[in-house]
Image (tube, helix red, strand yellow):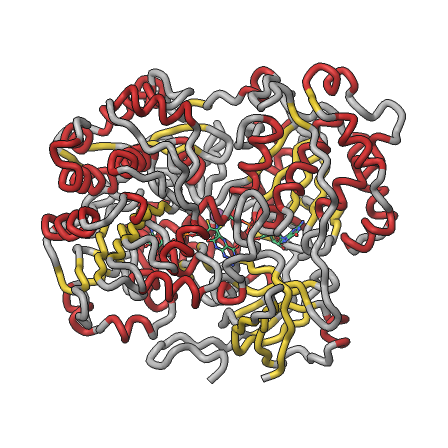
Amino acid sequence: MAGKPPSGDPVQDAPQVDEPQHAAAGLTAIGHTLRMARQQMGVRRTALTLLQVNQKDGFDCPGCAWPEPEHRHRAEFCENGAKAVAEEATLRRVTTDFFAAHPVADLAGRSGYWLGQQGRLTQPVYLAEGAERYEPVSWERAFDIVAGELDALASPDEAVFYTSGRTSNEAAFLYQLFAREFGTNNLPDCSNMCHESSGSALTETIGVGKGSVLLEDLYRADLIIVAGQNPGTNHPRMLSALEEAKANGARIISVNPLPEAGLERFKNPQTAKGLSGRGTALTDLFLQIRLGGDQALFRLLNRLILQTEGAVDESFVAEHTHGYDEFAQAALAADWDETLAATGLDRAEIEEALRMVLDSERTVVCWAMGLTQHKHSVPTIREVVNFLLLRGNIGRPGAGVCPVRGHSNVQGDRTMGIFERPAESFLDALEKEFDFAPPRHHGLDVVRAIRALRDGEAKVFFAMGGNFVSASPDTEVTEAAMRRARLTVHVSTKLNRSHVVTGARALILPTLGRTERDLQGGGEQFVTVEDSMGMVHASRGRLEPAGGRLLSEPAIVCRLARRVLGESSTTPWEEFEKDYATIRDRIGRVVPGFEDFNARVAAPGGFALPHAPRDERRFPTATGLANFTAAPVEYPELPEGRLLLQTIRSHDQYNTTIYGLDDRYRGIRGGRRVVLVNPEDAAALSLDDGTYVDLVSEWQDGSERRAAGFRVVHYPTARGCAAAYYPETNVLVPLDATADTSNTPAGKSVVVRLERT
Ligand SMILES: Nc1nc2c(c(=O)[nH]1)N[C@H]1C(S)=C(S)[C@@H](COP(=O)(O)OP(=O)(O)OC[C@H]3O[C@@H](n4cnc5c(=O)[nH]c(N)nc54)[C@H](O)[C@@H]3O)O[C@H]1N2
Ligand SMILES: Nc1nc2c(c(=O)[nH]1)N[C@H]1C(S)=C(S)[C@@H](COP(=O)(O)OP(=O)(O)OC[C@H]3O[C@@H](n4cnc5c(=O)[nH]c(N)nc54)[C@H](O)[C@@H]3O)O[C@H]1N2
Ligand SMILES: [Mo]
């Protein structure tokens, strides 16, 4: 039966549709926050927990990577941060009887939502080869099993060590150290599916793969362009920053195929005006672009800047950049008609954008997945860099690049060395500090790891958090790949689909979350994280752990490393487990910018990592200068009768974690199997609102993939474009459909046809 949840699942997927909203947050958001939080945590725990979020002596919100302002509110969290906290601090528990009552085959028939609702994992469990159920296992036995399978590999490169972005700096540093001492750089992470395109483009052009702005810069900007991002849902605290920027006179251009409510208007729940009034209008100019049209848009804007007398910052270009002539030649060839076709915009809109660009002395461009998950994402982001370089908008207050990260420590994990292609200098530093020879050849990223598992070249899959099979593209291929593994291991807080689509043997290892007290031999520990703007600070949980048998992530890595590496490792794993300050001492000696780490992180609010382009207009690229680039303009081609589908998040989810079945701002309630289609496209395809269709993706090699039973919703998205939620639609994204250079799955431009069911 198309579109119905698996049998036995209490969740009904019966979407209802109202008008989309035009403002985000306000009182309704507070109501929703408290209701969801109380359902999971009860009244007392809700109050105690939420007041510790993002306070200087509290824990870092596990929601997103948006930074904390210097002057914090007593309630420095947002509706969706509160949901993330409630999801972790829930009072519900998965106990021993649970696995006895539910064979893996039963769990594999449940929805991700149902799995998550069962509560926190509380003890290590093991699925033996051929067994039907997970059974409790001691930690010692669990580590023996992992060690046994790792020892049996023909090469360390047959193991894959995945990381999701909630892992702390301390745990991430130990984890990559363990993987490299074991002998592999197979360290794929969620970043491969997320901002890898940003990292690739920025490293090549400005020499640092991270954003170049701090919060103060946003407050000082004249113009903020928000392209391919939905902060109202995914980074709600960013709306307060945009509100403050506007109060200081900034203007905002939103570039998006969807009119996202949070960018239209914001009712700040922390101010009286926001609670009672109409809130603040945020967007001054909305460019409703077609999916994948951004490179063309920025290319034409660059041509128009070049053609405006005095618009180029010539001294900056002369002193700090390379490749200008070639870029200018390419930009001057930008064509109006082609740009209008690629973007779906009209001439007047682009001219208005140009006026705002030329009026601005200080411009910031913010972006997220709308720019990173296309085939041509890397050249698109490079074009954004060209745009900023032209007017000297990098390395000066109030201006710069602002890729807004997702997971709360995804940027920190990369800084700590979670990367399949580590820099030589990083490996040199590890070698010197820990006295071993790290492998020098590159490892597998997410997509390559799936291929290796599929082809039997990788045999052990170990995940530090995340939900690999649901987050990855081409669900059926990925699940089949995972089932070929000898052993799959997940260090997790909550149950998810990756625990029930397993290798021949499987382990689930329960771990502490951010909100929980972490007591070790050396006393109470804290960990550190790095936000989207390169600020590093401490995070300290206060709640009682969800169960007595949980281990922290650093403790799990230390014990595993001791068991697997044995005498061959001279690293003081035992000491690291007892006292995380000793880990930070080592990080300080290995990772640039972390010198004197323990002392500096003691300061309330933490410290900023150095960023050469931002701090001193120094560009550590191959040329030693900021690089202009001149790639050909690309945009997706759409065959007749087809739509270009983007896979997005609803308001009630955190990636693969589904909190609820509503997407309030978009007016969707009670279900997730919806496809948003422009009414004119729908009319051309004779699809009334409410029609049920299968989404069928068509890939270049002639193969097709199907996601069944979606309700058509007439929605004001750009022409030719459609949108549906991830992870339900990951089945449609071919494994080979990735961004050039970064290899990020192209989940924002999938060619589909809609087949009536
Ligand atoms: N509550 C909540 N918070 C989250 C997450 C969550 O799932 N829930 N996830 C976290 C993570 S890991 C991440 S990476 C971030 C994701 O944050 P976002 O990137 O905001 O997430 P998406 O839902 O993928 O939204 C993509 C946005 O880009 C637009 N877009 C898509 N394609 C294009 C395009 O071609 N051009 C332009 N200009 N726009 C386009 C879409 O319409 C949409 O507004 O959020 C983080 N925060
Ligand atoms: N089609 C499509 N696919 C996408 C995307 C898209 O936009 N479209 N977005 C991509 C992006 S941006 C990302 S970042 C990835 C996300 O990929 P992942 O990071 O792999 O997925 P999550 O859903 O965030 O992982 C949730 C799980 O993490 C575990 N967890 C939560 N907190 C902790 C913790 O503190 N410690 C540990 N050990 N485990 C914890 C829980 O068990 C939970 O079930 O998905 C990608 N996939
Ligand atoms: Mo992400």
Can residue 267 be seen? Answer: no
- Please tell me which residue is depicted at 13% across the width and 41% down the height of the picture: 563
* Position above or below: 36 against 11: above
Q: Quadrant of residue 351?
A: top right
Where does the image place residue 294, in percent across and percent down from the top left?
A: 71, 47
Q: Nearer the viewer, residue 528 or 304?
A: 304
Taking the image as shown, residue 423 lies to the left or right of residue 40, namely right
- Residue, far front: 154
Q: Quadrant of residue 90?
A: bottom left
Taking the image as shown, residue 44 lies to the left or right of residue 199, namely left
Where does the image place residue 261, in percent across and percent down from the top left?
A: 63, 54
* Position above or below: 143 against 366: below
Taking the image as shown, residue 92 lies to the left or right of residue 264, namely left
Quadrant holding the C terminus: bottom right
Where does the image place residue 494, in percent across and percent down from the top left?
A: 30, 57
Q: Nearer the viewer, residue 659 or 637?
A: 637
Q: Nearer the viewer, residue 418 or 387?
A: 418
Taking the image as shown, residue 430 lies to the left or right of residue 148, namely right
Can residue 657 be seen? Answer: yes
Q: How many marks?
A: 0
- Please tell me which residue is depicted at 68% across the width and 39% down the height of the picture: 225
- Please tell me which residue is depicted at 38% across the width and 59% down the height of the picture: 455
- Please tell me which residue is depicted at 15% across the width and 28% down the height of the picture: 575
Q: Quadrant of residue 309?
A: top right
